[in-house]
Image (spheres, coloured by chain):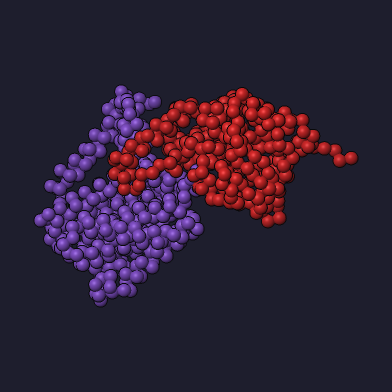
Chain colours: A purple, B red
Amino acid sequence: MFYRETGQFKTSYTADEAIFPIAQDRWFIFGVIAIAVFVVPFLIDDYGANAVLLPFLAYALAAIGLNILTGYCGQVSLGTGGFMAVGAYSTYKLVTAYPDLNLIVIVILSGLITAAVGVLFGLPSLRIKGFYLAVATLAAQFFLVWMFNKFDWFCNNCATGQITMPTVDMFGLQITGPGADPATRYLFCLGIVAVFALLAKNIVRGRIGREWMAIRDMDIAAEIIGIRPLQAKLSAFAVSSFYVGMAGSLYFGVWLSSAEPGEAFDINQSFLVLFMVIIGGLGSIMGSFLGAAFIVLMPLVLKNFMVDGLNIAVVTAKHVEITLMGVLIIFFLIVEPHGLARLWQIAKEKLRLWPFPH
Amino acid sequence: MESAAQMSHGKKIGDIVLAVENISLSFGGVRALSDISFQVREHQVLSIIGPNGAGKSSMLNVINGFYHPQEGLITYRGVTRKQMKPHEAARQGIARTFQNIALFKGMSTLDNIMTGRNTIMKSGLLWQALRIGPALNEELAHRERVEQIIDFLEIEHIRKTPVGKLPYGLQKRVELGRALAAEPSMLLLDEPMAGMNIEEKQDMSRFILDVNNEFGTTIVLIEHDMGVVMDISDHVVVLDYGKKIGDGLPDEVRNNQDVIDAYLGVSHD
């Protein structure tokens, strides 16, 4: 009843090409941002930050990165965990080498380093496609994790290969390291994720985004209309890895604070982010957020329900939780193969008509 | 004959823009094209006809760089070459449509046609990410041109529809739009009217002639409907089994004994 676009006329192409062309959508998203910025920081505690919000934000950024590559450009990648490791280790090396450098600059630089590595591992995509490319990116995953384990230089000659984030201040506020305020850490991540999500949205709805989608939908036709496959695919790998690298930087630097390559960045991370992208919706920035929220929150909800609600032993609950996650993923894929983003769209279309049947 | 060609349809036909010389193409032992030569003049509508498997599509694929012929030369606007990449041909102003529609199915009509202008767009990644200044202005300027094409092809109502959901006839029209968006100087159309009903064929013929008249685009098309071919072409080239058996004005080709034999068969007694 309240969700109607009647009377909202567009008189310019700028208005027609807005991200949220419908006024109600704009109010909704402004509301969400306002709550995220002005309300959540006052309610947040250590548990809320460490278990829910920080992983959600870090994974959302990683999911945007993978969605650019897989959802928009159609190149399957199983190397996300490895690329997150590149971001994390770049952050560690930069922070320890230049302790005075602004943390935002460090996060962006980590992204850029990862982008360079991503382009390198994207080169095979010019020759191989689909599942075969997925296998090639798997090589990246295993090679990168092995490399960080093998060479002590990456963790400043430590014995274990483990890296620990030192304390970093920005504008007098402590953001990383032990004792950092959860609200500051949360706001730092939120700022980066929000700004770069907007930039990603701008890229995918512009020339480069169309280039990627053209390659995804029909690469031969794309070449016939003048798109260079080399540039399109490598730019997708670069931008995607940039985002995944920044996600790795936040994941290690702000959320975990210490990480070991074999555990924090193993193949499971790659699958987790891939699930987020598939469940959230391939080819949708909004879907990346929804998918990350689903994968991060669902285990928590299930665990709380089973352990606190049904008094099931923690170990048993963990097993049931993993099984239920799998079942839920299959259920979602059958009900809506295009992911949560598509469900969101259908809900909006239904809401436009409600309470009338059609 | 020369003057007749220039007077055809009462419009000015210019100099030779594309010359195909002694093109031979084979796939293993199969000879798809042998020793084909013909010329296309500026502002001309040239049809390539012939029975199935005559090598018509292969000929188009050779012109826009998709196939690389073993022998022969192609001269386009003074540049002679043996082979090139498809995206280079696109940048030289050769656009094409396909026999089996090759649209980007997940994208809207608008995005498909906008993609056709990608080669003309310049702004870099950073500007686009910020979507301010040059990137935004460029996007809007190109949107305006695309809207003119949408207007011209009368597909305003399906602007935001994903093309995968459109009926066949409209998809063909969107594909023509995408080819036109690049503002090509030569348009290669591979069976633009295949599988269409009579109204759709009339619409498509009108669009092709309008493109030819209004934008002066040179058109090379493959078509099986002889009525359409004879009506809209300035010049007809006939292929059969990879060889050229006819080349001339529509009326000349219609009365050519070799062409009649190729189409109707000939008794070998």
Q: Residue at horizontal 48%, vertical 36%?
A: B183
In the rendered image, the residue lying farthest to the bottom is A159
Image quadrant where one finds the C terminus of chain B: top right
Front residue of this view, candidates A68 and A4: A68
In the rendered image, the residue lying farthest to the left is A172
Question: Which image quadrant is residue A207 in?
Answer: top left
The reply to whether residue A221 is in sight is: no
- Is residue A63 found left or right of B156 in the rendered image? left
Q: Note whether A232 is above or below A350 in the view shown.
A: below
- Is residue A89 found left or right of A331 in the rendered image? left
Front residue of this view, candidates B43 and A325: B43
- Is residue A271 found left or right of B85 in the rendered image? left
> At which x and y percent is residue A209?
39, 45
> At which x and y percent is residue A189?
22, 52
Q: Residue at horizontal 39%, vertical 55%?
A: A237
> At which x and y percent is residue A119?
39, 59
The reply to whether residue A26 is in sight is: yes
Q: Residue at horizontal 55%, vertical 40%?
A: B96
- Labels in figure, total: 0
Front residue of this view, candidates B16 and A185: B16
Image quadrant where one finds the N terminus of chain B: top right
Q: Residue at horizontal 61%, vertical 47%?
A: B74
> At which x and y percent is residue B237?
68, 37
Front residue of this view, candidates B188 and B195: B188
